[in-house]
Image (cartoon, rainbow, N blue to C red):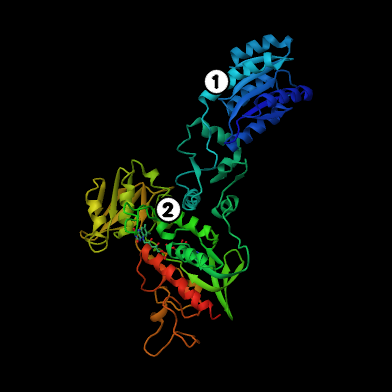
Amino acid sequence: MAKPILLSVDDDSDVLRAIERDLRSQYGGDYRVIGSDSPTDALGILNQLKLRNDGVALLLADQRMPQMDGVGFLLEARQIFPEAKRALLTAYADTNAAINAINQASIDYFFMKPWDPPTEHLYPQLDDLLDDWRASYRPAFEGIRVLGTRWSPRSYELRDFLARNHVPYQWIDVEQSANDPETQRVLEALGPDANKIPVALFPDGTKLLEAVPAEVAQRVGLRTRAQTDFYDLAIIGGGPAGLAAAVYGASEGLHTVMIEREAPGGQAGMSSRIENYLGFPAGLSGGDLARRAVVQAQRFGVEILAPLEATGVRIEGPYRIIQLADGNEISCHALMVSTGVQWRRLEAPGIDRLQGAGVYYGGGATEALSCKGEITYVVGGANSAGQAAINFSKYAERVVMLVRGASLAATMSQYLIDQIKTTPNIQVWTNASVSEVHGETHLEEISVLCSDTGRVERVPANAMFIFIGALPRTEWLDGVVERDDRGFILTGPDLISGDRGPKGWTLDRDPFLLETNVPGIFAVGDVRHSSVKRVASGVGEGSVAVQFIHQYLSKV
Ligand SMILES: Cc1cc2nc3c(=O)[nH]c(=O)nc-3n(C[C@H](O)[C@H](O)[C@H](O)COP(=O)(O)OP(=O)(O)OC[C@H]3O[C@@H](n4cnc5c(N)ncnc54)[C@H](O)[C@@H]3O)c2cc1C
């Protein structure tokens, strides 16, 4: 925990040095002592400390200073740190001014110069003041603070990124906490920069304005640059399948790198509760699963680069070379594609404009709490939508599921249907699809087309979460790896039809079970043609593929 601060201000450098020395020798173990010879500089320091979220216990100012007297300084400083104890240093001749200050400007104490010996004239009084201050002091949050507004898509993107990468942060909604005096003080310390949201404030006092995930990632030490340019195994995509391959590959001695576009965990990371994963009878959240897997992979020495996107691949003899969105390249002998699937877009007027401002794709883990007491819509009728509805029902006043079909039976597991039936604040609206969304700056209403009556109903809504199936995004593999007409990657037996072998295949063996038409490039998990779309199957494929990779590498 950072030490709280004792700040003294005196334009006479000898006096300043003396008071700093005495404060440090008595309180240096528990407090940080800062001195300034100018009241205006000291106010600047206080603003900086406010942005760092530091605690200030004591402000001690000389009364006679040329730019601003001590009382004036303490009055201004009070606006920034109202809880700090305030004391004046005065000469005998200024005693009256000091007494007036105590009355008029709520100053806690005044000390006479010289204060020798401090054991008699300084420490006993300061001990009292500091004890008093400590009694009501609550240590401040020491991580990153993000200032933004709930309806700003860029604020949402940053919060979602931090949450999914398990970076602790404190969220300050500058609109919702507009009446909170502490938020006001932070905004004042920021000055005009407060308009450049999202603002990320770091514990060292630095800040990022209009902060974007990639910049914040670098600041918090997420690695986006590879340590070397060659690996035995490169894995693209850090969902369950990629993470399993990383753990097995590295634990079996392969020099392994994993490249992830957003945050390790993939779709599973968005799941509020996975109830069917072996070994967790009470279920576990996708975020928890991802966090454990990342720690496990790192323990075996896997290099995880995130956020970083793979944008292309080319073959040079035994090398598979991956092109990255930052312009760099990495080469490897074996390449595993585990890029999963991404949410299908909902085509309706208003959706793109309001995305991140009330309209969200996927679970929106960061948004669940904001739905407290609101009406929340979930679009879709599959398991992912069901899980999300149950999760949101813990916070929202009412959750309405918009389901295109006539019932959930065809698309959702029975255990989820049963849970939904017994959750009183979830309403299932069948034969319903979104035809338009409305709102100026954020979602306010949804037009719902009822296919049984042909009518369109316009209903108020605070938030809408879309779960309408997913497709792979594999265009970056165009011309290299064979895919089906929806973009899923073909592997093993799926590449062989009749006598026709895989396109461009030159080896005298058939492709391994999870190998693509390019020797040494493997595909696992949801991105693979005809895969079972489950966490366990992705983990299984990722683990099994490592065995084929060993066989492949033994002949490279
Ligand atoms: C809300 C929800 C709830 C679910 N609940 C369950 C459940 O209870 N039980 C269950 O078994 N399954 C569940 N599933 C399904 C399960 O999560 C998926 O089957 C599983 O995550 C697939 O794993 P994967 O590794 O193949 O792909 P994904 O999890 O999709 O991960 C792919 C990763 O690749 C990254 N990526 C994509 N393209 C690139 C690129 N070009 N460069 C770098 N990285 C890239 C993505 O950012 C992503 O992190 C759920 C899914 C969702 C969405």
Residue 416, above or below 105:
below
From this view, report whether residue 454 is shown above or below residue 56. Answer: below
Helix, strand, or loop for circle 1?
Answer: helix
Instruction: Write the residue at 53% across / 46% down.
Output: 198
Front residue of 117/458: it is 117
Q: In this view, does 399 lie above or below 496?
A: above
Foreground residue among 26 and 273: 26
519 left or right of 44 in image: left
Residue shown at 59%/69% (left/top)?
330
Residue type at mark 1 is Asp
The Cα–Cα distance between marks 1 and 2, rounded to whole angstroms, is 42 Å
Residue displayed at 60% across by 33% down: 3
**Which numbered tag is attached to residue 179?**
none
Position of the N terminus, as image quadrant, is top right
Q: Mark 2 points at which residue?
A: 287
| Residue 310 rendering spot, x and y as whole percentages | 53, 67
Q: Is residue 230 left or right of residue 408?
A: right
Q: Position of residue 209 (x, y in %)?
A: 59, 46
Which residue does the numbered mark 1 point to in the structure image? 132
Whether residue 480 is visible, yes or no, is no
Nearest the eye: 339 or 172: 339
Would residue 526 appear left or right of 84 to someone viewing this image? left
Q: Quadrant of ligand 1?
A: bottom left
**Kind of residue at badge 2:** Gly
